[in-house]
Image (cartoon, helix red, strand yellow):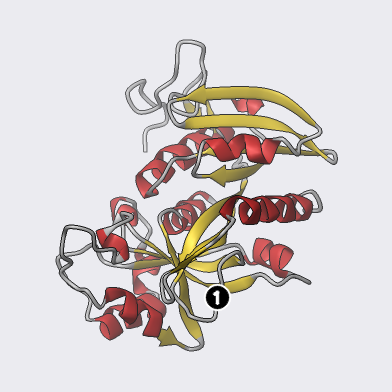
Amino acid sequence: MASKLSSSELVLNPDGSIYHCNIKPEELADTIILVGDPNRVSNVSKYFDTIETRSQKREIIVNTGILNHKRLTVISTGMGTDNIDIVLNELDALANIDLKKKEIKPIRKPLTFVRLGTSGAIQKDIPVDTIVASTHGLGFDGLMSFYANTESFYENPIAKEFIIQTKWNPKRALPYLAEGSEELLHLMTENSKVILGITATAIGFYGPQGRILRLNLDNESMNEQLTKFTYNNNRITNFEMETSAIYGLSHLMGHKALSLNTIVANRYSGTFSKDPYSAIDSMIQFALEKLTKF
């Protein structure tokens, strides 16, 4: 790795802010809430006591403020692991690269990431409007294959057993497994009704999650295989599109991460929440109360 980064690798805006996230280092808190939907940024920051900075570029909206003396940043990532790759790399750069000198800082600064998202359950006993905390992210997206030092994600016994049990199609990206922060998991699940499980991260919303509209699937029993998968009391609880990348990149960069999802649909029973926005708001308030004590 070069000691000094080139302008084509570390891209900045004319005002010195990081290219996509459009903020400067001093505008980023150490605790960061990740949301997919840009509209959800204001749904989170409306609970802040004060908002210091606001920024927007494309689908990425950033609000940084204070809640109960805790400084927090909430940022929208958009959907998918490709967007997570952009956002987490840039947030890490804000904390760990001197943007003016374009040099990596000698002392690493750890960040805390908490995703507040929506998801579909694939188990019958997980009702809509509940919250799932991801112990692991099982990635089908292939993102980690582009980074070094990811062997442990692919050699994980759960990932290996998943490939065997599902007879994984070799034309697809190899599944990998990344773990969330045990400290954050304990924080969010202590004295709560939050459900724990492995979250499967798909590379799309329709075919990759087993949805059939006009196009047929190469494996119409995929969701059934995911539902039935079990290994040493581990099971897959839900489907979404970001968690594995958040966990994988956070692990490589030395950050803490946890993914919380409001279950808005149950794919097993075919049901959808009657009031998803209220359920999401309940998750937001729950997470903020926990984070202000962290």
Q: In which quarter of the image is the N terminus?
A: top left
**Residue 46 x %, y %:** 72, 35
**Residue 214 x %, y %:** 17, 57
Q: Nearer the viewer, residue 217 or 252?
A: 217
Give SS at disc 1. loop
**Residue 111 x %, y %:** 62, 45
Q: Nearer the viewer, residue 158 or 216?
A: 216
- Image height of 193 relative to 41, above or below: below
**Residue 263 x %, y %:** 54, 63
Residue at the (55%, 63%) spot, across then down: 180
The extreme right residue here reads 68
Residue type (three-letter) at the residue carrying disc 1? Ile
**What is the crowding at mark 1: few (fewer than 14 residues within 10 Å), some, or many (at least 20)?**
some
Q: Quadrant of residue 191?
A: bottom right
Left or right, residue 23 beside residue 189: left
Residue at the (59%, 73%) spot, across then down: 196
Q: Can residue 4 be seen in this view?
A: yes
Residue at the (40%, 75%) spot, across then down: 156
Q: In which quarter of the image is residue 134?
A: bottom right
Residue beneath label 1, please? 126
- Image height of 118 relative to 231, above or below: above
Q: In which quarter of the image is residue 268?
A: bottom left
